[in-house]
Image (cartoon, rainbow, N blue to C red):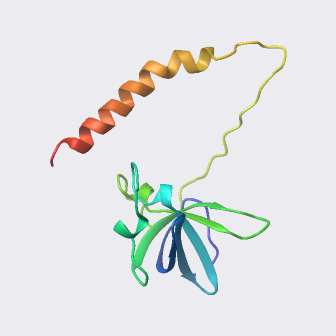
């Protein structure tokens, strides 16, 4: 099976380490769910979210073209169901120009909005459904 970034796949947890869980995707392919991709928010112990031999639905975050390593996420599926079709992946282009000296202005301009968004997300998590 050819894998694509953004694709939703099913795999089986084959091993758990303090930093993440290894997932067999079939056909001698394996991916890693980093502990930060297990759940939105702080994860103290990955064993609270995953067990060995558990079948999991995950999203492919990245595929290293050189090593073939696949990065996976459970967190992406917590809020949005992506379906089985891969989503279009867009690479962001970040650039700097040594002639333009804007310092931290772009961050300063967006900081209030980021704080409001984070507080809103925290309040939604605390509100029972």
User: Who is closer to the viewer here, 53 or 6?
Assistant: 53
**Residue shown at 42%/84% (left/top)?**
53
Q: Residue furthest bottom?
A: 27
Expressed as whole percent of the image width and height from the top left, the position of residue 127 reads 18, 42
Q: Position of residue 97 (x, y in %)?
A: 81, 21
> At 57% from the left edge and 21% from the top edge, which residue is drawn?
107
Image height of 38 relative to 122, above or below: below
Residue at 36% of width from left, 25% of height from top?
116
Q: Residue 72: percent from the left, percent from the top?
A: 54, 64
- The percent coordinates of residue 22 (x first, y second) are 54, 74
Number of marks: 0
- Residue at position x 67%, y 45% from top? 91
Q: Is residue 85 visible?
A: no
Residue ranking furthest to the left: 128
User: Does residue 128 lie above or below 37 as drawn?
Assistant: above
Instruction: Please tell me which residue lies in front, 77 or 48.
Output: 48
Pick the quarter of the image with the N terminus: bottom right
Q: Is residue 27 above or below residue 113?
A: below
Q: Quadrant of residue 24?
A: bottom right
Query: Looking at the image, can residue 64 be seen?
Result: yes
């Amino acid at each position: 099976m050819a894998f694509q970034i953004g694709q939703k796949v099913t795999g089986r947890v084959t091993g758990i380490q303090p930093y993440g869980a290894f997932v067999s995707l079939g056909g001698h392919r394996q991916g890693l769910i980093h502990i930060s991709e297990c759940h939105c928010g702080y994860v103290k112990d990955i064993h609270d979210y995953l067990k060995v031999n558990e079948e999991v639905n995950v999203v492919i975050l990245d595929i290293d073209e050189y090593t073939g390593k696949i990065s996976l996420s459970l967190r992406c599926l917590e809020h949005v169901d992506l379906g089985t079709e891969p989503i279009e992946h867009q690479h962001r282009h970040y650039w700097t120009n040594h002639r333009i000296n804007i310092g931290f202005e772009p961050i300063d301009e967006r900081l209030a909005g980021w704080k409001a968004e984070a507080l809103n997300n925290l309040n939604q998590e605390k509100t029972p459904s």
